[in-house]
Amino acid sequence: MLNRSTTTALMALATGALTACGGSSSSMSTPSPSDGPRIVQPGAPGQNGRSFSTEELDNVEGVTFTEADVRFMQGMIPHHQQALQMTALVKQHATTDAVRQMALRMEISQRDEIELMSTWLRERDQPVEMPMGDMGGMSGMGGMNHMVNGLHVMPGMLTAEQMEALTNARGLEFDRLFLEGMIQHHQGAIDMVATLFNTSGAAQESTVFKFAEDVDADQQMEIDRMRGILEQIR
Amino acid sequence: MKDFGQTGRFGLLAAAALLATASTGMDAAAQQQAVVPNAPALEWDPNDPRIGLGAGWLDAESAISGLELLAAIPRAEGFFNPTTPADGRFNNTDLAFQGHRLIQGNYNGFQIIDISNPADPVYELSVVCPGGQGDVSIYGDLIFMSAQETRGRLDCGIEGVNDSISAERMRGVRIFDVSDMSNPTQVAAVQSCRGSHTHTVVTQPGDTENVYVYIQGTSRVRPGGELAGCSGGMPDEDPNTALFRIEVVKVPLANPAAAEIVNMPRIFADDQGNISGLWQGGDHGEGTQSSRLTNQCHDITAYPGIGLAGGACSGNGILLDISDAENPRRVGEVADPNFAYWHSATFNNDGDVVVFTDEWGGGSAPRCRASDPATWGANAIFRIGEGGQMELAGYYKLPVPQTETENCVAHNGSIIPVPGRDIMAQAWYQGGLSLMDFTDPENPYEIAFFDRGPLSIESLFTGGYWSTYWYNGRLYGAEISRGIDVFRLTPSEHLSEAEIRAAESVMMGEFNAQLQPKVEWTPSVDVAQAYLDQMVRSNRILNTRAQEIQRVLNGNASASQLNSLAASIEADVVQIEAGELGGDAERMARLASTLRGMAM
């Protein structure tokens, strides 16, 4: 939340910081809060706008995250972690170069995204781990409230049996199971994004919106690519 | 250690993030070695002052070369979150310029800033209208702004839109009337299926009654229940898909409220009419980059002066013939094994070279690390041949590594109008500002830079320059989380005082980076001196001839003296072109033409 005192403190900090930059500090300038700009809000086309008063500044922040956003982030972390468990097997068992490359790319992006999600949750004082027994509002998932390899099960995630089959597979059979499993896994992430966007009030915050869109686009692209590889090795 | 300082909470969060990073850090390093890109490694000067800069939000250390920082102002009240500098709802985005005003786009709206004195920019007005990205353009009395997020509202409300299908939602291009700059009014909201990630103002030479806006949508296609006709399937099952197209908006200047989409050209179609006729997604062979399926343009830069637009379109760079602005037609396309996501395009002033940028990692990832290849997340520079054929000339990447906690990749820039040279000032997010000389497209190099340390050394928070653009003699940087910076050029071994003055003499009434203007220099001593300085620097002129020209430029030469010198230089040009004399025929010809202009 914005308020006058923190804003003033920030401006003061900024002034100090710029002076400390050295060099051309004398020509630097910072607007003082007292003569800050007027704030207006236009209306819809054809409608009048209005001014924001100083007292309303607290309200400028606008939409914030919702419970559904938190559950989405908390749920996508174990989802991504299972992808990492799967790609870890590729190093030992995959026989197709295309599968190896695919897995390496996924490992980097899924790891980066786990970091992004964890940071997002911490910044908002939310637990990074999904609370036990909470399926993140994923209604219709009843009965799936369990763990596989220490991870909460989310849509599309491989079952314990599927993970075991993948772990024991060798040769082209491994490559095939990996691709089929990862397609199923990614499709689950895409479904999670769709659920998020269909939830009232969800994905309104910019970071969540961008992240959900990225997951959607990236994983769809990888599904298309994996289908292509699958056709070649079948 | 400097952090975001004023809040203890932030420090704790950062420390928690550090633990998470440390636990995966080893794997990540091993990972880097496992991927062997078929691309050259980054090379850099180990003494580069940009290495090891201290971190901080508004107190980071900085390094500068060939530039002077004139002003740095933080984001305005209501357009940042004091406890979270990288709060995505308040990211500063693109810039537009008109007269003595700078328009700063922001995910939460836009600001109007008085830059009458560029060293003392003053916020005039903040306009609240969320929707992201908030990229802005200005044309006459109209400001255009992109909205793509599902929180965007028709009424510019800050409360978002709860329902997944709602008539209150606005995704597309907003049009504001700013004939009264102190009271912008929204006159139109042109809705589109994928919203507007970026947009491009396009003028039709000869048409003073209309202006066109191309909408580049990259987001989810919204349901047909919210906007009629929207669907997002693949072409084989959904021939009317909102993918694989851009939207063209026609804006009648006398009645901008009547702005509407008049065309949705299938600019990726092949000769057989397959609307998905370009890059199909995936890599280009072992060790190559994986490029996205071309079903969208991220950005388009129109250059009406040459009748072309450069489209950075997902898996391809394309050229569009825009001589009929309402009906852009693709005339050329390239793919590149180093490009992940074609992001933006900038032409040189002559219009025979185009720079495309690759936004590998999407802008929020660190892609300028020492381990990242020199041709990935970089610029690719193409020569434009007959009929729009493009030929790869070279690559340019920020020539100094950045840390793991700095999002960094090629981003938006514009041309600095130094006569006789092609120079682009470019934003590299937290990699800072880098000035690239690409006069020789095969051998681009850096001539100036500014860089701050990371926002944090413990965790990556998105920040850095979104755009750095030249306008009427100064460089303006839109810092995502730190505000606005203003620079001037300073002389160096790479840039002379005359070259700087010649660039500073170019004045425009309006500037939008995506509507590239053709620069013409008024003949002056500075312009002539700039050409001479360039030939002397590159050792491509005889000393005696250079001295003679310098004597004329130093004195108050009469018209006849100028014409006489021009005539002898023109004779040189003939000899150089005939191979009888060494030298730089093109610059000599430009110099002679400048001298004749001065004599008039």
Image (spheres, rainbow, N blue to C red):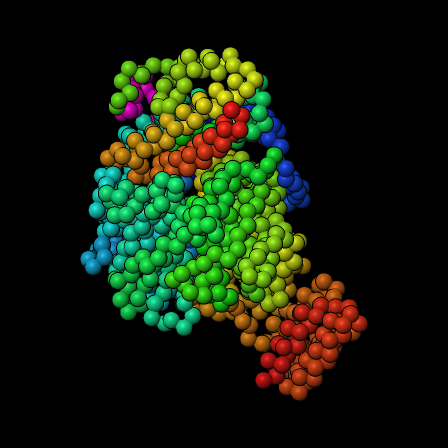
- Residue name at image x 44 percent, y 53 percent: B267
- As drawn, which residue projects farthest toward the front? B272
Q: How many marks?
A: 0
Magenta region, main secondary structure: loop
Residue B426 position (above or below residue A132): below
| Residue B106, visible in the rendered structure | no
Quarter holding residue B121:
bottom left
B121, B297: nearer the viewer: B297
B267 sits left or right of B165 in the view: right
Q: Position of residue B536 (x, y in %)?
A: 72, 66
Residue A231 position (above or below residue B233): above
Q: Position of residue B395 (x, y in %)?
A: 61, 49
Whether the magenta-drawn stretch holds residue B200 is answered as no
| Residue A114, visible in the rendered structure | yes
Q: Quadrant of the C terminus of chain B?
A: bottom right
Residue B127 position (above or below residue B589): above
What segment carries the magenta color? Answer: A123-138
Quarter holding residue B544:
bottom right
B439, B29: nearer the viewer: B439
- Residue name at image x 66 percent, y 77 percent: B592
- Residue name at image x 34 percent, y 32 percent: A193
- As drawn, which residue projects farthest toward the right? B580
A100 sits left or right of A193 in the view: right
Whether the magenta-drawn stretch holds residue A129 is answered as yes
A42, B321: nearer the viewer: B321
- Residue name at image x 45 percent, y 15 percent: A163
Q: Position of residue A4 (x, y in %)?
A: 30, 46
B191, B245: nearer the viewer: B245
Q: Position of residue A140 (x, y in %)?
A: 26, 22
